[in-house]
Amino acid sequence: MFLKKGEKVKVTVGKDKGKTGEIIEINRVRNLAKVKEVNMVKKHKKATKENKGGIINIEGFINLSNLKKLDDIKKKSKK
């Protein structure tokens, strides 16, 4: 299955099973992708002169094998 940045996908396995979102970033070497509002992890940021520090939520990577295109799901349900 070939996925591209900007496609809508559904998570099939894991703590976020059933959630849908858009692909933000793909790492083809490690077979990982970041999906908008899925697999949120906390990151500790150090304060700088410009930015306030603290704990922020960002998207973590998820394996490509755990994602399915929404178009494929809709085609199968119509049959």
Image (tube, rainbow, N blue to C red):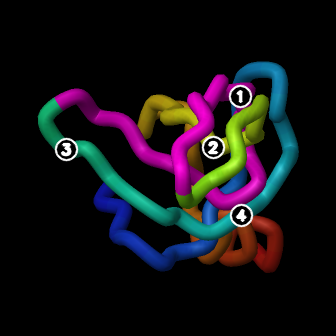
Q: Is residue 42 magenta?
A: yes
Label 2 or label 1, whichever comes before in sequence order: 1
Residue marked by disc 2: 59
Q: Nearer the viewer, mark 4 or mark 2?
A: 2
Residue marked by disc 3: 28
Mark 3 → mark 1, Cα distance in angstroms: 21 Å
> Where, by quadrant of the figure, is residue 46 drawn?
top right
Left of 41 or right of it: where is 69? left
Q: Amino acid at mark 4?
A: Gly
Which residue: 82% across, 33% down?
A: 16
Residue marked by disc 4: 21
- Percent position (x, y) of residue 78? 80, 78
Q: Secondary structure at mark 2?
A: strand
Residue marked by disc 1: 41
Which residue: 53% across, 43% down?
A: 48
Q: Nearer the viewer, residue 18 or 73?
A: 18
